[in-house]
Image: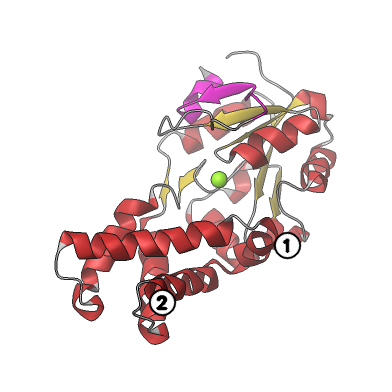
Amino acid sequence: MPALPRAILFDLDDTLIRAYAQPEEAWTRLLNVFATHLDAHDPAAIERVRAAVMEEARAFWSDSAAAAKWRLDIPGARRLSVRRGLARLGRADDALADRIADSFTELRRQEYRLYPDAHATVDALRDAGVRLALVTNGAAATQRAKIERFELAHRFHHIQIEGEFGQGKPELAVYRHALERLGVDASDAWMVGDNYEWEVVAPQALGMRGIWYDPFEAGVPTQATAKPSRIIKRLSELVE
Ligand SMILES: [Mg+2]
């Protein structure tokens, strides 16, 4: 076992479970199901719809105040992005947009997967005496359902969900509260996750180490000011 801190805070989505990563392929697959309704009869036509929807989603999520609100209603946010995407193409149809968005939400839900080394890594850390917290943004019911489905609750000493706690990452109060619940100082704790702002920049500002999980080898964002304390491509690297 390598040198470990007294506590580790883990992100949930796209860190312990694969949830929302790489949306391009999922959108293309889903939009093909609706090809007739969209009057999109070849790959180029599908691609135009996918690009319009994803551009609207990007614009939508880049407003951090709006994002903080809509994180608690991701299905609603998807409906809005698809409505705007169809409107951008001159094909506004809110009823169709909502059906497509809801189908995407269900497709993603069905395809959530635990990363294969997640349980073993978390259990090994716990067995080694590390205090563990799961710190996730999102709605209480949505996140609780994932925690249940993937048998995560009993593995952590503390679970903190944005929709229950009332604040989400990157608010520093979120990390401070988790550290307090674990009884550990920031300097004795790591945060592990895939979101650069939430799991590297903010925790480091508090004196924690920010371990960036980069399973698809996207690389450090070019505009990044903070440097990750460490980059891992697999969770099991934490215990090797
Ligand atoms: Mg994440």
Q: Is residue 154 above or below residue 209?
A: below
Res. 105 image quadrant: bottom left
Residue 109 shows in the view: no
Q: Badge 1 is on which residue?
A: 164
Give the colouring mode of the picture.
secondary structure
Instruction: Judge by depth and name the residue closer to the eye, 73 or 181.
Output: 73
Residue at the spot 52% in from the left edge and 30% down from the top edge:
121
Q: Is residue 49 above or below residue 93?
A: above
Please identify the quadrant where the N terminus is shown.
Answer: top right
In magenta, the rendered stretch is: 225-239
Tell me the amino acid under the disc marked 2: Ala
Percent position of residue 200, x then y: 66, 33
Percent position of residue 21, x then y: 43, 47
Instruction: Judge by depth and name the residue closer to the eye, 75 or 160.
Output: 75
- Of callouts 2 and 1, which one flags the residue occurring earlier in the amino acid sequence? 2
Q: Are marks 2 and 1 in contact (CB under 8 Å)?
A: no
Of labels 2 and 1, the one closer to you: 2
Residue 30 shows in the view: yes
Q: Badge 2 is on which residue?
A: 87
Residue 159 appears left or right of 34? right
Percent position of residue 4, x then y: 67, 19
Would residue 16 be counted in the magenta stretch?
A: no
Q: Secondary structure at mark 2?
A: helix
Residue at the spot 42% in from the left edge and 84% down from the top edge:
94
Residue at the spot 38% in from the left edge and 67% down from the top edge:
104
Residue 209 appears left or right of 81? right
Marks 2 and 1, how far apart at CA: 35 Å
Residue at the spot 35% in from the left edge and 78% down from the top edge:
90
